[in-house]
Structure formats: structure tokens, C-alpha cells
Amino acid sequence: MVNFRSFLDPKTSIILRLALTKAIQRAPLSICMAISISVLTYTLIFSETFAAGQTLWLLLLITALLTITTSLALEYDTKDELDVLVYLGVSPSDIFKLGILRVLTLSLIGYFIGLAFALIIPIGQVLNVKVFYTFLLSILFGVVPPLYSAFKSLNVSLLGRRAFRPLSETEIPSIISPSEIYELKEFMDDVLNDHSELVVVSTSASVDEEAELLLVCRYLGVAGRESAAFIASTGLDPVKVFREDETLPLVTARLRFREGKCPSLNCWERKRDKNVENTFVALSFGTLIKQLVIEYKVYKGRRRADKLD
């Protein structure tokens, strides 16, 4: 295999390596197409002295079938190849043009081979009109047959590109159905109550107009456990004390759910009767909630596996 990395950037070398591998795999078919175009070109240039009408139509039919077969065989419709191209940043329009250019290149190669033979071994008069019309015909054979396969590759690459589209800052990379909201709430209640740096003030879920989960907590920080132990030693309930302590940061997380979509998350801290999002406490709480949503999917999968057992 040719090593393109020595004189090209990695992205271009991978693309060329894919194209070269595909060309080697389809070499016999590609050669047959180029030969058929060259024979057709030679025949059309000397059509008056070389071929009768029925023979000419038969040759056109054979060439068309070979061109269509080659275009279908050369298309980038295998998912692995398309995934690599999309991941490398090749645009869908470039993939579409690539599907056309491969077959067009083979057709033009066959045309110039046939034209060269017509000039070297003429069996009649070489007319400029016929040279021009055979050139147009070779372009037609190189552009029309691969249109279907090119559009198919374009469609697959568009879907792949959408799959690689980055999530927004508020989206969590886990698809959760609105019907799971109460189960997620139960999971959040259990886990958040075990975090010594937080005290759960309230959790609520609704699926009326919009599926939404609201989590409100007091943030204690790393000293929360020591403070809780001290308050408990005085005979008071530390959870109740912390919930009512307005000097502690109050953070809220709102999760919104849509069917088949990633849930969106907004977190804020209540400061001076205002909701402020870009605070250390709000960002830390948001990171924790994102992690818990992902862990919920793992927990749910394990529980489902246990049921199957």
C-alpha cells in the first residue's frame, strides 16, 4: 500500500488511502468500463465505415450497463467508510461530488484512450463533429449513471454528520423518555441524600405541559459532614437545620425531557433574590446532576439485566 503520510497531511492521506483501496478492489470492473468507453468512442468516430445501426445500439446498451454497474460498485455506501469520511470532516457535498468524479474520471480515461487509437489507427476520416459528440457522450456516461449512488451516499453522510454534531452546553448525552421521569426522581432522591456536601430541600416532577424535574438543594461544601456531626451532638436534626439555614447557598437544577431527545439541564444559585447561573456552586451542582443522569442509565441497565437473570 502506498504511504501517503510522508508527503501529505493525515486527513488527506486517509482519504486517498480509502480511495486507493476502493479502486484496487474494483479494478477489474473499472478497467472494463474504461475499455467499453474507449471502444464506443472509437466505434462512434468511425460509425459510417465500422458499425451498422443495430451493432451501435448494442454497444451503447452494453456500455450503459457497465457504467451503471461500476457506479453502484464504486459508491461510498459502506457505513465504515462513510463514518471515517464524516469523522474526518469531509462535507456531504464533497462526498456527493466524489461519487460523480470517480465514474466521470473513468469515462474520460476511456474516451481519451479511444480517441488516441482513432488518431493512431484510423480506418476512416476523423471528423471534429464526431470527436466533439463522442466527448459529450462520455461526459453523459460519467455523470448520469452515478447520480443515484451519489445521492444515496449524500443521504447517508448527512445522517452521519448529524450524529457527530456536538451537543449544546445544556444537553446531557443520555436519551431519557419523559415516562422515566418519576423513576429518575426516585434515583436522584436516593443518591443526593447520600451526598454529605448537599441537603435536599425539595424535588418535584411534572409531565403535564412539559416533562420537567426540579431539584433544589442547600450546598454545604466539604465541611458539611463535620457540621452535621456537631449539630447532631446538640440533639438537633442537622438536615432540618441546614434546610432552613438561609446563609447556605441554595442551588436549583431543572431537567427538561423530550421524547427521543437528550434532556436539557439548567442550574442556578439563588443570590440576593436573583438566579445566577455562572457561579462555582451552580456549575459544580450541574456537573453532579449530569453525572447522575448518566449513572441512572447504567443503573437502569443493570437492574434490567438482574430481572432477566
Image (cartoon, helix red, strand yellow):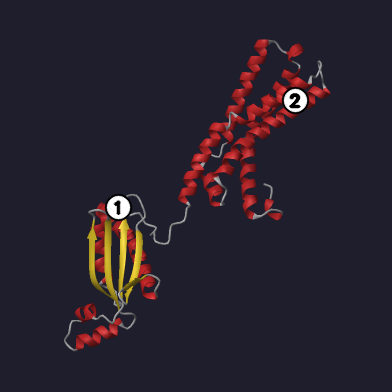
Which of these two is toward me, 126 or 9?
A: 126
Residue drawn at 76 percent across, 12 percent down: 49
SS for callout 2: helix
Image position of 277 (left or right of 166): left
The image shows residue 120, relative to residue 252, as above or below, that is above
Residue drawn at 29 percent across, 54 percent down: 305
Residue drawn at 53 percent across, 44 percent down: 82
Which of these two is toward me, 71 or 215?
A: 215
- Separation of marks 1 and 2 at Cα, in angstroms: 62 Å
Q: Is residue 77 visible?
A: no
Quadrant of the image occupied by residue 53: top right
Quadrant of the image occupied by residue 277: bottom left
Assess disc 2: are there few (<14), some (14-19) or many (≥20) residues with their C-alpha within 10 Å of its C-alpha. many
Residue drawn at 61 percent across, 45 percent down: 18
User: Amino acid type of disc 2?
Assistant: Gly
Residue farthest to the left? Answer: 235
Q: Nearer the N terminus, badge 1 or badge 2?
A: 2
Image position of 270 (left or right of 42): left
Assess disc 1: are there few (<14), some (14-19) or many (≥20) residues with their C-alpha within 10 Å of its C-alpha. some
- List x then y, in percent, for residue 54: 65, 11
- List x then y, in percent, for residue 307: 24, 54
The image shows residue 153, relative to residue 112, as above or below, that is below
- List x then y, in percent, for residue 236: 17, 85
Residue, disc 1: 177
Residue farthest to the front? Answer: 273
Looking at the rendered structure, the number of numbered marks drawn on it comes to 2
Q: Find residue 99 and name its label.
A: none
User: Amino acid type of disc 1?
Assistant: Ser
Residue, disc 2: 114
